Image (cartoon, rainbow, N blue to C red):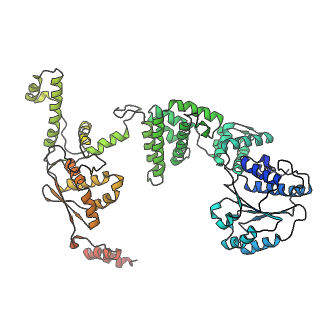
Amino acid sequence: MEYIVSARKYRPMSFDTVVGQQALTTTLKNAVSSGKLAHAYLFCGPRGVGKTTCARIFAKAINCQSPTANGEACGQCESCQAFNEQRSFNIFELDAASNNSVEHIKTLMEQTRIPPQVGKYKVFIIDEVHMLSTAAFNAFLKTLEEPPAHVIFILATTEKHKILPTILSRCQIYDFERMTVRDTINHLKNVAEKEGITVEEEALAVIAEKADGGMRDALSIFDQAASFCQGNITYQKVIEDLNVLDADNYFKIVDLALENKAMDIMVLLNNVINKGFDGGLLIQGLAKHVRNVLMARDPQTLPLLEVSDQQRQRYEQQAQKCQIPFLYQALRLINQCDINYRQSSNKRLLVELTLIEIAQITQPDDSVGSGRKPRRLKSLFKQLTSAVQPQKAAPQVAAAERVVPSESSDSNSSSESGESRDSRPSRESNPSAAPKRPMLKSAVSMSFKNILEKSKPKKMSVIPGTLDASDPNATPKDEEQSFSQQDLELQWMLMCNRMPQKLSGIATRMKNMNPVITEFPNVEVTADNQVALDQLEQIKGSIASTLKLYLHNKSITLTLRLAEQEEIAPILSRREQYELMEKENPSIGKLRELLGLELA
């Protein structure tokens, strides 16, 4: 016996067997029963939702000689039997993808002149009508608007926006909906029962999600899974056959994140990647999972979950353990990762950092992690970036100056708590009794405690990462430390990198500017054009405050000026760059002659 795929074998033959389009089929049945038929219909919607099938059923019901009271075809008359045996001369199907020229439309118009031999109407079903050329559409307009009384046009398309508005205004438009996961699961259950196949509902849910609202796709995937599983469709076999990431991974990630077990999540991510799955696929699936957990927290949004009953129960159980702030923050981090994933050069690292941050949402900001609870990345990175400061000419003296205030503050606090003041002179007079501090020779040799101490400027008026233009006169603590040109250029570049997104334009221009120490501590910045100079003037106070803070010198003054004509370096073409290089190094010209190279 010839094998027929399920999408054709179980194609609906009546309105009542159409899945997921109840409102639309009811309208068509009422039109047939009342006899109020339009001359042109347009069925539009995504693939595999029943547009062509409904067009055929509708055409069959229109020509039925004795339709039922609810508008269905009887299936017994000559017209219905001719349609079932595919020998009806009253129903024509035209594929507009291969018949899209003006000549094809003219041939169709000639066929409309001949009245039907059996039945009342000649029905022309034009599939993929958006593929018609503009000339063919224009040739079709007049006949579509005023066809003969015995002609009805049914147009079907997946891309309604490509159809001319003049065509749309002449048709009754029916928008087909995507199949819901529940409707798809129920239909697949009926098909499996008729085929004698045992199935698990979770496996059918995976097939329904993979089909993305198309019943034809769902039946095709069902046939594939049935061949792989040999009559027993299980969840594990389906995800193996379709190469779908197991939903258990998402449940485990959320459970581990609630326990702050970032390292266990890293192991799970590595196992997922080793199985051949992309990190971006994991992020997309995790976003959908966290969204479902959020929906499962409220009975009002619980129906929004398009999953099987078993999965719905698992979501409800996990939702009871997750707080709403955790879910909101996790969704924000996942969405940001999804946005940056395509542009990232190290995609795996981006995914790992995102999962680590999710695992640390419920961890207190000031907790120092140990073992499976690492310190929060956000706070740690802030401290490290604010601590990277250029070393002064005398590092030992600078270190001593930074250490003494902390000792005095410690001694004062200890004296207030009842400690004897006699202990301080003894420590000062006996250097060996005092604790030895490491010698700060460079930024690399700083201890972690000093890094934390140097992060104190966060409480100043200028916050790392922003420029507060509303307070241009903000100054740091009383410091008169010297700095070099190299220190100035370093802090200038770091300041440009910390500027907020709304100042990204001027920050890019500032990176190409070179601040110069004219007469210490006066700093001069030269702008190439008046536009850049005006933008600098608006944030001049904030720039000066930032330089004072990070160069530890409150006497810094900032001067802005427009560059002279001779100071602006000309933009050289590639040929001019090469000629300049050859002029400075004649060996380049000799090498070009030896190799026989020519300038492009």
- Can residue 242 be spotted in the picture? yes
Please state which of residues 186 and 34 is positioned toward the viewer in this rendering.
Answer: 34
Please state which of residues 215 and 582 is positioned toward the viewer in this rendering.
Answer: 215
Q: For the image shown, how many numbered marks are present on the structure?
A: 0
Query: Which residue is drawn at the image coordinates 79% and 58% (left, top)?
Result: 37
Percent coordinates x, y for residue 333 in the rendering: 45, 44
Percent coordinates x, y for residue 67 in the rendering: 87, 51
For residue 487, side relative to residue 107 (left or right): left
Percent coordinates x, y for residue 205 in the rendering: 66, 41
For residue 395, side relative to residue 223 (left or right): left
For residue 307, side relative to residue 545 (left or right): right
Q: The C terminus lies in which quarter of the figure? A: bottom left
- Can residue 348 be spotted in the picture? no
**Quadrant assignment, res 589:** bottom left
Q: Is residue 27 above or below residue 527?
A: above
For residue 425, side relative to residue 559 (left or right): left
Please state which of residues 237 and 558 is positioned toward the viewer in this rendering.
Answer: 558
Percent coordinates x, y for residue 331 in the rendering: 48, 42
